[in-house]
Amino acid sequence: MVVPNNFCGIPEEFSDYSKAKVAIISVPYEGTVSYGKGTSKGPEAIIEASKNMETYDEELKWNAAEVGIATLPEIKARQDPEEVVKQVRESVLKVLNDEKFPVVLGGEHSISTGFALAVKEKYPEFSVLQLDAHADLREEFEGTKYSHAAVMKRIHDINPSTVQVGIRSLSEEEGEFIDREKKKIFWAKDTYDNDSWMKDALKLLKNDVFITFDIDVFDPSIVPATGTPEPGGLSWYTVVKFLRMVFEQKNVIGFDLVELAPTKNSHPSDFLASKLVYKMIGYRFKK
């Protein structure tokens, strides 16, 4: 049997865009990567792993693929990061205008600025929830304001209502910005041995939420396949417990998952990423 080449490998009755509630947008871009390479191969690896994943969710006792998940043609990303941001904005905005739930697979984190710009046009009052090892709050990095290391500063400029979770790496410049703007950061060191922070984070989010998820928020013992791994990261069950609370209590508009850098002949990170994407879709539509 030939498995369809789409997210979850599902037949046309569940992958037809006209009927689907979810649209997968792949952005294989890594134009500003500053350390480990390979994030351009992330979307393909996630989709390939998803084709070998059970679509029945034992936690939700439900097959989320039944809501319809369309996998769109990947964005042929231009080299210039500002142009890629424009491409992502246009693609996400079309999905939102078609009243579907956008899921963007990266690629590097710089693409998330385009997602935020699209959301801003449809939802003037929203919050951005970032799960990440890095603050990504530099004004610019290596000559561009559209670097992966500056993505949350660009998003802050679009919408200062941001909540950052899992952070454990930042520059002095970023630390000064956090203090000056009184940004609330849920540091990884304060989350690993308790769940009390989860309710506090939820209180800071507005009703409409865009989630930007950098795979390096996980500890590298769980997800080694990422460009800039940082020790002391979050665990699978901590992350999914928090995400379920977010989806249950807020109106999640869409999400991206970025910074997977697949490793040849080693697939645990790819499979975790695909499982996480599917889990989040399940949380969104299992009401």
Image (tube, grey):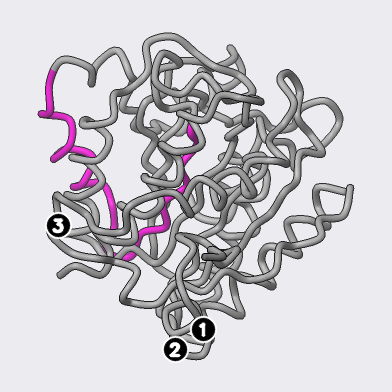
Q: Nearer the viewer, residue 53 or 219?
A: 53
Left or right? Give the position of 102 relative to 153.
left
Residue 78: image tag: none
Q: Are marks 1 and 2 in contact (CB under 8 Å)?
A: yes
Q: Nearer the viewer, residue 263 or 26?
A: 263
Residue 213, magenta (yes or no):
yes
Magenta residues?
194-215
The residue shown at (24%, 58%) is 56
Q: Which residue is mark 3?
A: 60
- Whether residue 161 appears in this view of the structure is no
As drawn, 145 above or below 111: above
Left or right? Give the position of 196 relative to 127.
left
Q: Which residue is mark 2?
A: 19
For disc 3, the neighbor class at 10 Å (few under 14, some 14 to 19, many from 20) is few
Label 2 element class: loop
Whole-percent x, y for residue 64 in the image: 29, 66
Disc 3 marks a residue whose amino acid type is Leu
Label 3 element class: loop
Whole-percent x, y for residue 140 in the image: 74, 32
Whole-percent x, y for residue 91 in the image: 66, 71
* Mark before the other along the chain sequence, 3 or 1: 1
Q: Which residue is mark 1?
A: 16
* Mark before the other along the chain sequence, 3 or 2: 2
Disc 2 marks a residue whose amino acid type is Lys
Disc 1 marks a residue whose amino acid type is Asp
Label 1 element class: loop
